[in-house]
């Protein structure tokens, strides 16, 4: 008993304060929009909004996800969107926080995920600025820092305008093709008293439009071409993550008897071991994949990343012999600053629609395909195993050990390192694999893993991220957020103690110039001293194991780590993996 009440009955919380400050309606608008979380690294430029989130909303959503760096905050929202398809809010402190976050924003933009970025600036009115600090935290056009890789941005000058900006930003970030949007809030506007009550707009009247449907004529022509094809090929890229769309893609491929290629850069979109998917996925098309592209007579690209580059790799300077159908609305984001529009592909039927809508429409028009001798071909093996490695456990051995350790559990592979073979991927569900970081920015992996873990908490799925050591070290402090929020998560570090991808680049340059390939490691190794990743994880509240250098210890260590993560703890395992010797 405490003050006359039973111990298990809590006193009613005090009523929330009335909206009295500029940031109060902004916080209430975020709640009304249904945003579940706001990831943040605290900043004085949005201290008004922070107070409103804490003291006006209390335990109501959006709930704060505290991060140790703005780049991590954006990466967490990125990982969350990969799982859910929905945006998180991210609060970024002034110009300096936006600068910190810019790499992660570029990753999210290139990966085409939704995200609502809330920026802030020192008072735009110079007479309201405090000496020194408010001046260096104010920029004339803060959105210009990221405008080249942001879908839309605004800096509203009143509370009413801010509410409309939030509605528009939320609507646009959720509209296909998705990408981050940015709203910059004036610090003085947040902290000024409200002069009159503010009515919140109804978010239900500001929903995104459905994804565009393919024109009937394009559907009819594409259906005829695919039905008549002798060797149809479907390139499955950025598509819907729901189970219905997954099943429809499988049904279309089976009805057409079409080969399918998938891509490690994007999330799972087709069963990796289906008989119609004869080539393991890869970050860059393998020789086997390019062979299928050359042999196909009709190619259907479903928002395939870099269709033009794939066709150039396959055909070189020759004319593309296949009839090419490309379904994507990605061109609406192409602005010329970023070259993520890639090579211009030769296309015979361009369809500016959502690829899932085209698949659905084609399913309604095509019948079962006649037998096609030799198509699809038998399974084509992945690139040759690198063979002997030096100074560590073969990465294929790590893949085998991890597969045994998670056997029987539902997992989501959040990320894989560049050296991971697609042949070791067994994808059967849209959440089995979440793809790469989008923009090639090292350091995203830990934050992506935390965001995915946040989204998957309570789902029965264990998030597993296999990261390179360079990726882990650039973003390691993101793991503190997993510990702080007690998120089940397994991080396995494929630790080659080097920026090894660049070692390979140096070896190629040395070969071209007739210089010693044995010097490829200079300026690349992360050794002397070797970072103690297990102790680093422990310092952040994450259970650490390793380094594992003995293959005979690998399976037992991974089994313990999986069991601990499944019980609700973030866990890291450091595995020393080997690399091919120089000059092999």
Image (cartoon, rainbow, N blue to C red):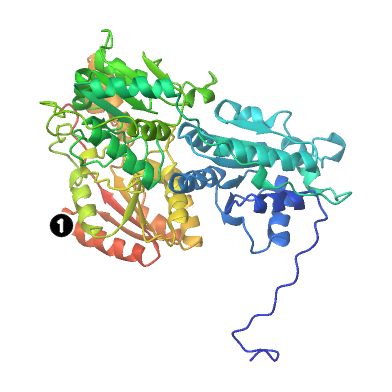
User: Quadrant of the image for the N terminus?
Assistant: bottom right
The image position of residue 175, as x and y in percent, is 55, 36
- In this picture, is 549 found above or below 295? below
Residue 584 locus on image (x, y percent): 15, 28
Q: Which residue is painted at 60% across and 42% down in the image?
A: 116
Q: Is residue 522 visible?
A: no
Q: How many marks?
A: 1
> For this view, does 81 lie left or right of residue 552?
right
Judge whether residue 225 can be spotted in this image. yes
Residue lying furthest top? 318
- Tell which of 403 and 97 is nearer to you: 403
**Drawn side of residue 156 relative to residue 99, left or right:** right
Q: Which residue is mark 1?
A: 552
Q: Quadrant of residue 287?
A: top left
| Relative to 512, residue 452 above or below | below
Q: Nearer the viewer, residue 344 or 546?
A: 344
Secondary-structure class at tag 1: helix
x and y percentages locating residue 142 in the rendered image: 68, 31
Left or right, residue 126 beside residue 234: right
Picture residue at 48% right of the left edge, 26% below the top: 329
Above-or-below relation of 513 to 238: above
Percent across and percent down for residue 446 are 43, 48
In this rendered view, identify the residue nearer to me: 123 or 78.
78
- Say left or right for 373 vs 509: left
Identify which residue is drawn at 46% across, 28% down.
353
Local crowd at mark 1 within 10 Å, few (<14), some, or many (≥20)? few
Q: Is 215 or 178 nearer to us in this picture?
A: 215
Q: Is residue 564 above or below residue 131?
A: below
Q: Quadrant of residue 424?
A: top left
């Amino acid at each position: 008993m405490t003050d006359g009440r039973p111990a298990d009955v809590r006193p009613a919380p005090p009523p929330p304060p009335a909206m009295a400050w500029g940031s109060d309606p902004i916080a209430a608008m975020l709640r009304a929009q249904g945003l579940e979380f706001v990831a943040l690294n605290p900043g004085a430029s949005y201290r008004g909004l922070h107070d409103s989130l804490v003291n006006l909303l209390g335990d109501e959503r959006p709930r704060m996800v505290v991060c140790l760096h703005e780049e991590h905050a954006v990466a967490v929202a990125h990982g969350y969107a990969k799982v859910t398809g929905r945006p998180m809010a991210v609060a970024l402190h002034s110009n300096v926080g936006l600068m910190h976050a810019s790499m992660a924003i570029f990753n999210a933009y290139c990966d085409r995920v939704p995200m609502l970025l809330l920026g802030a600036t020192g008072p735009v009115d110079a007479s309201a600025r405090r000496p020194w600090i408010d001046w260096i935290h104010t920029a004339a056009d803060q959105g210009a820092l990221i405008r080249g890789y942001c879908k839309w941005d605004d800096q509203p000058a009143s509370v009413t305008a801010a509410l409309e900006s939030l509605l528009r930003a939320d609507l646009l970030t959720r509209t296909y093709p998705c990408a981050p949007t940015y709203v910059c809030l004036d610090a003085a506007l947040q902290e000024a008293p409200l002069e009159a009550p503010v009515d919140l707009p109804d978010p239900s009247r500001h929903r995104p439009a459905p994804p565009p449907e393919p024109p009937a004529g394009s559907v009819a022509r594409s259906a005829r071409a695919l039905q008549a094809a002798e060797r149809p090929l479907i390139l499955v890229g950025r598509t819907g993550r729901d189970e219905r769309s997954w099943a429809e893609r499988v049904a279309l491929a089976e009805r057409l008897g079409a080969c399918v290629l998938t891509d490690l850069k994007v999330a799972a979109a087709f069963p990796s071991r289906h008989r119609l998917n004869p080539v393991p996925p890869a970050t860059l098309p393998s020789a086997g994949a390019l062979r299928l592209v050359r042999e196909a007579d009709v190619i259907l690209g479903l928002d395939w990343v870099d269709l033009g580059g794939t066709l150039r790799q396959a055909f070189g300077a020759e004319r593309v012999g296949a009839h090419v159908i490309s379904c994507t609305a990605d061109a609406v984001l192409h602005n010329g600053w970023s070259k993520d529009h890639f090579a211009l592909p030769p296309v015979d039927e361009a369809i500016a629609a959502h690829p899932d809508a085209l698949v659905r429409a084609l399913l309604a028009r095509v019948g079962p395909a006649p037998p096609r001798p030799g198509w699809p071909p038998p399974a084509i093996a992945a690139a040759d195993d690198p063979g002997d490695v030096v100074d560590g456990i073969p990465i294929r051995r790590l893949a085998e050990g991890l597969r045994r350790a998670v056997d029987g559990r539902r997992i989501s592979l959040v990320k894989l390192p560049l050296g991971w073979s697609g042949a070791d991927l067994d994808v059967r569900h849209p959440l089995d694999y979440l793809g790469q970081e989008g923009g090639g920015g090292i350091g995203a992996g830990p934050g992506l893993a935390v965001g995915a873990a946040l989204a998957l908490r309570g789902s029965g799925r264990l998030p597993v991220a296999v990261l390179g050591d360079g990726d882990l070290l650039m973003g390691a402090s993101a793991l503190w957020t997993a510990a702080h929020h007690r998120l089940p998560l397994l991080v396995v570090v494929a630790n080659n103690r080097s920026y090894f991808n660049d070692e390979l680049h140096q070896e190629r340059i040395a070969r071209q110039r007739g210089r010693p390939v044995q010097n490829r490691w200079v300026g690349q190794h992360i050794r002397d001293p070797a970072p103690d990743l297990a102790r680093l994880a422990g310092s952040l509240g994450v259970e650490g194991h390793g380094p594992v250098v003995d293959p005979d210890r690998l399976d037992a260590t991974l089994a313990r780590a999986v069991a601990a993560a499944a019980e609700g703890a973030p866990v890291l395992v450091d595995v020393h993996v080997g690399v091919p010797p120089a000059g092999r």
